[in-house]
């Protein structure tokens, strides 16, 4: 399990996607966020200068993953805050609480890659196999 990557990009026509992995749900959700922001910005350019709380709720686990990643996009696009580290504290099938560390967007230092517009339900899967959590997510770019 130590050789398992936190996430892997996957090919998808006209979109981008990833498969995230975790030993538990907090790790899975944190790795999904890391993967999404890997598409958006070079993570090496983002410093952990301040921390912000993030909460998400939904009716099921798949919806919760979409809500969590959507809240992070609002934090980025709406508040101009660029997360670098994701500390998911609690996850239930319908609620999540986390702390994200990062900094305000600085176009002079941050190298942007793709404009991730939304998290989609297309092909969305959250499952547990062989003691490991796995999630597949497709993003609208």
Image (cartoon, helix red, strand yellow):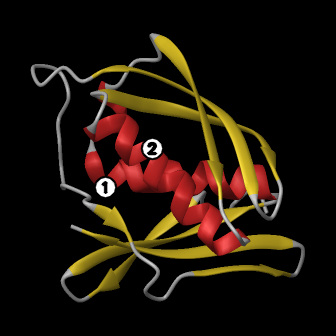
Report x, y in % for residue 60.
72, 72
Horizontal side of residue 117 vs 94, given as left or right: left
**Rendered image quadrant of residue 82:** top left
Q: Nearer the viewer, residue 38 or 71?
A: 71
Report x, y in % for residue 66.
52, 64
Q: Residue at x 54, y 58 (%)?
A: 67
The quadrant of the image that shows the C terminus is bottom left
Horizontal side of residue 59 vs 40, given as left or right: right
Q: Residue at label 1? A: 39
Q: Residue at x 26, y 40 (%)?
A: 77
> Can the viewer see residue 4 in this picture?
no
Q: Residue at x 72, y 70 (%)?
A: 61
Q: Residue at label 2? A: 72
Q: Residue at x 76, y 70 (%)?
A: 133
User: Where 58 sits versus 121, above or below?
Assistant: above
User: Where 81 sits versus 77, above or below?
Assistant: above
Report x, y in % for residue 84.
46, 31
Q: Nearer the viewer, residue 110 or 63?
A: 63
Of marks 2 and 1, the one in the foreground? 2
């Amino acid at each position: 399990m130590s050789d398992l990557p936190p996430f892997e990009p996957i090919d998808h026509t006209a979109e981008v996607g990833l498969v995230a992995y975790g030993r538990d749900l907090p790790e899975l959700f944190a790795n999904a966020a890391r993967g999404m922001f890997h598409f958006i910005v070079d993570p090496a350019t983002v410093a952990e200068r301040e921390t912000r709380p993030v909460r998400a709720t939904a009716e099921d686990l798949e919806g919760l993953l979409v809500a969590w990643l959507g809240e992070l996009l609002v934090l980025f696009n709406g508040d101009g805050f660029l997360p670098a580290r994701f500390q998911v504290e609690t996850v239930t099938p319908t609620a999540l609480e986390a702390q994200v560390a990062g900094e305000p967007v600085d176009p002079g230092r941050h190298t942007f890659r793709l404009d991730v517009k939304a998290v989609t339900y297309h092909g969305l899967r959250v499952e547990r196999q062989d003691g490991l959590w796995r999630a597949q997510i497709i993003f609208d770019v």
